[in-house]
Image (cartoon, rainbow, N blue to C red):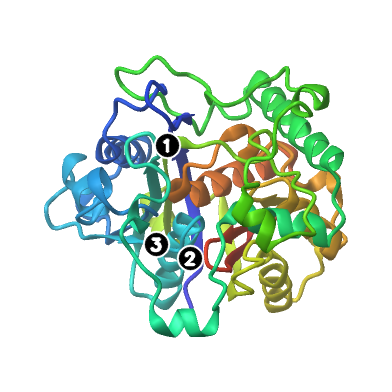
Amino acid sequence: MNTAVIVDVVRTPVGRGKPGGALSGVHPVDLSAHVLRTVLERNGLESGQIDDVIWGCVSQVGDQSMNVARQSVLAAGFDETVPATTIDRQCGSSQQAAHFAAQGVIAGAYDIVIAGGVESMSRVPLGSSAHGGAPSEGLRERYPDGLVNQGISAELIAGHWGLSRTDLDTYAAASHRRAADAWAQGLFDSQVIGVPGVDLAVDETVRAGTTVAGLSGLNPAFRTDETAARFPGLDWRITAGNSSPLTDGASAVLIMSEQKAAALGLRPRARFHAFAVVGDDPIMMLTGPIPATRRVLDRAGMSIDAIDAYEVNEAFASVPLAWAHELHADPARLNPWGGAIALGHALGSSGTRLLGTLVGHLEASGARYGLQTMCEGGGMANATIIERL
């Protein structure tokens, strides 16, 4: 088998995903095109050398419809012979794109692939692709009370693991502090690229002055008369402050075989060590990273203690806290440069954003192994183990 390696990872800064956000005036196709061009330029490649582009995007309607990956390749000026596809694994879409790309390299189907993703939540609001849809008869039969949104799942997790409002807000404030410190130390500089015509050099959502006291004044975001009646035992502690904000952004990772990298004179930065993807309870929904991590560790023949850093997507503070409790993970190794609560969660791009953060941290710290996992809509999760080279 071939060895699949990561040669480069780039991303845009993250903009607030609302009208007036720094990236709201940029079409998602153009955001994607910018990171795609940058990957080629930074590595001295011609577009015709790329075997495929695999792109994540969750809300594939409006500006993100009609195979946004192919549109982005064309907008980037790539040769028309370069194919591209858009995939939806919900929040893990670009992590799954990286899996598919690396697995294709390992199987010998590809030499060079670009995986990544985009989401412009200011232009294509969260839930846009669900508008007008109704659950099927079969789904209603299996779940007669209906499925729930992710905020409710985050509340259920907080209740099940006994996470208090203070626990959640303390974690959220720490995420902002870690992210602000990482930016201040220049740790993101090598991977974050400015967007032409946009005055944004750092992630727009990081608030260095966030405190637990400030977060404590926010109201629960998901309690309604309907949800309170359905889940009467919940204490309702998930707020906008301990959740990831709506954001815009794009990211990409250059993946190739180790042999191809050597032939091109490019330095591999990390290799893919193991992969996993699982389904889990669609009501609890966001617990998927727990079994996904267990599966990927089993496949790698490793224990959690052998992993030097973990990137667990902070869709809500309750997710990484429950994950760390179940895996007996070292809190000091969890999202050391901050997570999505501070850095944002531009859905389709988050998987490769986390991957870039993980590679950067392993390099900066001299550590060897990193694990990435993400909760996903519908009760799924991806997990990846990489090894710094």
Q: Looking at the image, which residue is at 47% across and 43% down?
A: 9
Could you say where residue 365 lies in the image, as x and y percent from the top left? 74, 39
Residue 94 is situated, as x and y percent measured from the top left of the image, at 45, 55
Q: Secondary structure at mark 3?
A: loop
**Which callout, 3 or 2, points at the residue further toward the start of the chain?**
3
**Residue at image mark 3:** 88
Q: Residues within 10 Å of mark 3 (few under 14, many from 20)?
A: some
Residue shown at the point (35%, 64%) measured from the top left: 111
In this figure, which residue is indicated by the disc labeled 1? 249
Residue furthest left in the image: 80
Question: For the residue labelled by badge 1, is the local secondary structure a helix, a strand or a loop?
Answer: strand
What is the spatial separation of the Cα atoms under label 3 and label 1, in whole angstroms? Answer: 16 Å
The kind of residue tagged 2 is: His
Q: Say whether marks 3 and 1 touch (CB < 8 Å).
A: no
Q: Amino acid at mark 3?
A: Asp
Say which residue appears at 65% left-offset and 21% top-offset: 207
Q: Quadrant of residue 67?
A: bottom left
Label number found at residue 169: none
* Residue 376 appears anywhere in the view: yes
Whole-angstrom CA distance, mark 2 to mark 1, is 20 Å
2 or 1: tag closer to the N-terminus: 2
Nearest to the observer: residue 104 or residue 380: 380
2 vs 1, front mark: 1
| Drawn side of residue 28 relative to residue 304, left or right | left
Query: Mark 1 packing: few (<14 Cα in 10 Å), some, or many (20+)?
Result: many
Residue situated in front as seen by the camera: 123 or 232: 232
124 horizontally vs 17: left or right: left
